[in-house]
Image (cartoon, rainbow, N blue to C red):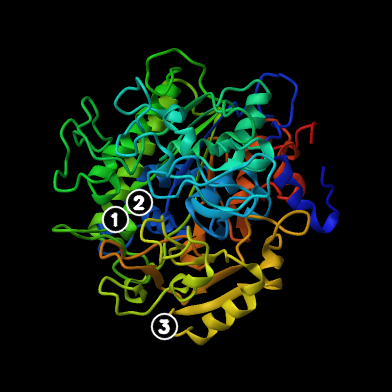
Amino acid sequence: MFQPNKRTLALAVFLTASLPPTALPQAQISGPNGIRHVLLISIDGMHALDYLNCSLGVSGVNGGAPYCPNLAGLGNNGINYVNTSTSKPSDSFPGLMAIVTGGSPRTVGAYYDVAYDRSLDAPAQTTGNGVAAGPCTAGAPPTGTRTEYDEGIDIDQTKLNGGAPGAGLTDGGIASINPAFLIRDPRRGCAPVYPWNFVRTNTIFGVVHAAGGYTAWSDKHPSYSSVAGPGDGRTVDDYYSPEINSAVVNLPGVTTPTGVSCATIPDPSQTGSWTDSFQNIQCYDTLKVNGILNQIDGRTHNGQSRAPVPNLFGMNFQAVSVGQKLIEKNVGSGGYLDATGTPSTALLSEIQFVDASIGAMISELKKQGLFNSTLIVITAKHGQSPIDPNRFFPIPGPNGNNGNSPATILANLLPSSESPNNPNGIGPTEDDVSLLWLSDSSQTGNAVSMLEANAAQAGIGEILAGTAIAQLYNAPGLPPHGDPRTPDIIVTPNFGVVYTGSSKKLAEHGGFAHDDTNVMLLLSNPNFARALVSSTVQTAQVAPTILQALGLSPSALQAVQMEGTPVLPAAPFQNPAAQ
């Protein structure tokens, strides 16, 4: 097996994709401060500024009073980290992986939901989103392939249950993943690469599960079962993943925490996807909220079976992200009214919905006598950019008149799966960042020159290539000299530029800008003293902090060992003896 030197240590995990989670002694999960449960919440898109505004109040909104009273209440016994940065890129996939592994894309290998890997081969069948099928020969040199870990690998992405055979209306989970849609590994007999084995390092779910704990997670795609980490995908004991990009349907018996019935679709004008409507997204998120409430009550997410209250559980909210960036036809725009983050009416509604949902969780924890023994961690996979509505500039824009994106400029140098010239492909990896994998990496210098010559029309702020890439990540290439997943070029655009032709959005995420990466981070427990930490921290520090809170060793995480990721400062947990 390839043995890296110190300089290439992070690349070692590339060759250990099937490495099982670090084994720990079977033991009762209980932290030195009486913490036996961790409830981890990602409010996707929630900036540190959003939390400050909603907990303190903003003039002209809600009469100037706080409009997230439950989140504000958690802050009374919480540590608020106001200078927190997500992963870079700040896409949902690397953002989530940072939170649960303690690692960056350099180590974990996750750059975007849709990315590229030079060491793998195409799926056996063309995916639902258009990643083309291709050949794979066991033991032969790989051809490289577009990687996709979103709704495109569902058996049927139009269905809320992902098309899982025999599943209920909302409940497919990992059974809804179509293995024929998965990219394949020629080094392992062309076996399909499941989401949990695409991740190179173990996760907090794997560590807690190995220590005898019970784990649960709810997210927006079956593919986000990647949180389980390498192995058989079962280190998350109760995984729930109604497909967010499915067709909107009636949800009998479902009522949001703010009292809206979802038995009939609240916004029947938008049924293509749950993210197309300010109202419908709240019904979608309520499915996962109800799952959390069932788990607090000692049941599985669907309430059908008894189960332990998880030692580690949680979910992501999508409502705030939708409220930040959606322009809904015949309804209006979300987002912000100014550069100081005053929310629009639509965004205000989403924040209040999320706050009411968290309030329901708090009430249920208290009802079951679990509030004092539960650490609540609230953060976000990513932010959203720009906050200032006057800075938004789409390229090429809805009319195609605002310029060309970097991928369009370099279309002839990109693999077919990445190129905008491919009419059937999934398209390039571009939002308010552009990640570029070239067909021939030796053309990197030529590609950079082309981008420099067209910098104005592409709204380019900075071009990262060569040593500028290797400073942040492993150098691009194939082992033993490079990392097959590292882009050849990353373009960060001028602030406010988003590479889109859509008329339905006014912000996006994925990039390196402050509004993309600065997110809320709150640790709360009734026994904590209120504190504000202004030093720079990373969402990757959440993972080792959670393990330490549960009395487990942060160094059980492979990414923590490799990157030296520290526990969050001011976290009031004693170091476990195992550390």
- Position of 550 with respect to 379 (left or right) is right
Front position in the image: 462 or 100: 462
Quadrant of residue 385 within the rendered picture: bottom left
Residue at (67% x, 64% y) in the render: 472
> Looking at the image, do the residues carrying marks 2 and 1 touch, with CB atoms under 8 Å apart?
yes
**Picture disc at residue 199:** none
Q: Is mark 3 in CB contact (under 8 Å) with mark 1?
A: no
Distance from disc 3 to disc 1, alpha carbons, whole Å, reads 31 Å
Per the model, the C-alpha gap separating discs 2 and 1 is 7 Å
Q: Is residue 453 left or right of 141 when viewed as pictured?
A: left
Q: Which quadrant of the view contains residue 56?
A: bottom left
Instruction: Compare marks 3 and 1 and give the one earlier in the sequence.
Output: 1
User: Label 2, on which residue?
Assistant: 320
Q: Quadrant of the C terminus?
A: top right
| Mark nearer the N terminus (2 vs 3) | 2
- Disc 2 element: helix
User: How far from the left and from the top, in percent, is residue 510?
Assistant: 48, 60
Q: CA distance from mark 2 to mark 3?
A: 31 Å
Q: Nearer the viewer, residue 233 or 29?
A: 233
For discs 2 and 3, the disc positioned in front in the rendered view: 3
